Each structure stands twice: as C-alpha cells, then as structure tokens.
Image (tube, rainbow, N blue to C red):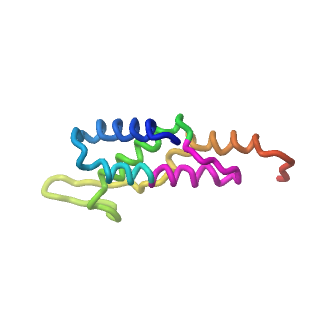
C-alpha cells in the first residue's frame, strides 16, 4: 500500500467495520494500519527479495488485523475475560492465519530473483 489513497481507503473501511463515523480515532487507526503494514512487509520479505509496498490484493489482511487490534485495546495480553454475564476469549493477533494469502507474494517474488538457487 504505497499511496495515501490506499491508506485512506483502508482507514475508511476499518472505521465502517468498527462503527466509527467521526475522526477522533483516526490517528490511532492510522498508527495501527502502519504497524500492520510493517508486519506484512516483514513477512513477505522473508524470502530475501525486498518489497517496499504491501500488495493491494492483501489489504483485506490489513483491515482484518487492524480491527482485531482496535477491539483489543485495553485488553492487550489477556486471553480471556469475564464481565458480569459476558465472557470473552481473544485469539492471538498474528499473521499465521493469513499465510495462504500472503505466501503467494513470497513465492512470486522468489521467481523474480536472478541467478540460481540451491536447495
């Protein structure tokens, strides 16, 4: 996600998903978006080819993880909690459940690497 239009689109979509209509949380959401972008880039760059931008086709990963991170604010580090009759269980927020979508970009970048590869 290189351009600000894409970041603005992600921000708009995330706000829609969590039900925000004002701009009070935009700075926080943009920070979360930036963090998740960095995580995705770190993951897809593990094959040695450096990608500078997150592929547009995986912005769904960014949106999903940002919503999860936003919903966990105040409950970081907890695995479960109970308030009155309401019980919550949180899954770990990592990229492991998105590897099917992300590995495509690690594998496709591999084929662009010049030279031979020994296995």
Between 92 and 104, the one nearer to me in the picture? 104
Q: Position of residue 118 (x, y in %)?
A: 85, 53
Q: Is residue 95 left or right of residue 107?
A: left
Task: Residue 24 in the image: state x and y as whole percent.
Answer: 23, 48
- Is 43 part of what is drawn in magenta? yes
Q: Residue furthest left?
A: 84
Query: Which residue occupies the extreme bottom position in the image?
Result: 77
x%, y% of residue 68?
36, 49
Query: Residue at the location (24% across, 41% down)?
Result: 20
**Residue 60 picture location, percent across and down:** 45, 38
Picture residue at 28% right of the left edge, 61% below the top: 75
- Characterize the magenta stretch by its predominant secondary structure: helix
* In the image, residue 112 above or below residue 119: above
In screen coordinates, is 119 left or right of 33? right
| Left or right: 59 as drawn, with respect to 27 | right
Picture residue at 66% right of the left edge, 51% below the top: 50
Locate residue 57 relative to residue 119 in the image: left or right: left
Say how many tags the image has.
0
Res 55 quadrant in image: top right
Which residue shows up at 27% across the image and 49% down it? 25
Q: Which residues are magenta?
A: 35-54
């Amino acid at each position: 996600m290189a351009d600000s239009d894409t970041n603005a689109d992600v921000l708009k979509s995330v706000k829609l998903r969590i039900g925000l209509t004002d701009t009070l949380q935009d700075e926080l959401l943009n920070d979360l978006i930036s963090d998740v972008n960095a995580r995705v880039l770190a993951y897809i760059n593990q094959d040695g080819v450096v990608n500078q931008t997150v592929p547009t086709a995986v912005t769904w990963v960014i949106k999903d993880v940002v919503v999860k991170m936003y919903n966990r604010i105040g409950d970081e580090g907890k695995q479960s909690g109970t308030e009155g009759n309401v019980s919550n269980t949180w899954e770990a927020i990592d990229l492991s459940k998105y590897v099917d979508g992300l590995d495509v970009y690690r594998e496709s970048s591999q084929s662009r690497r010049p030279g031979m590869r020994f296995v």
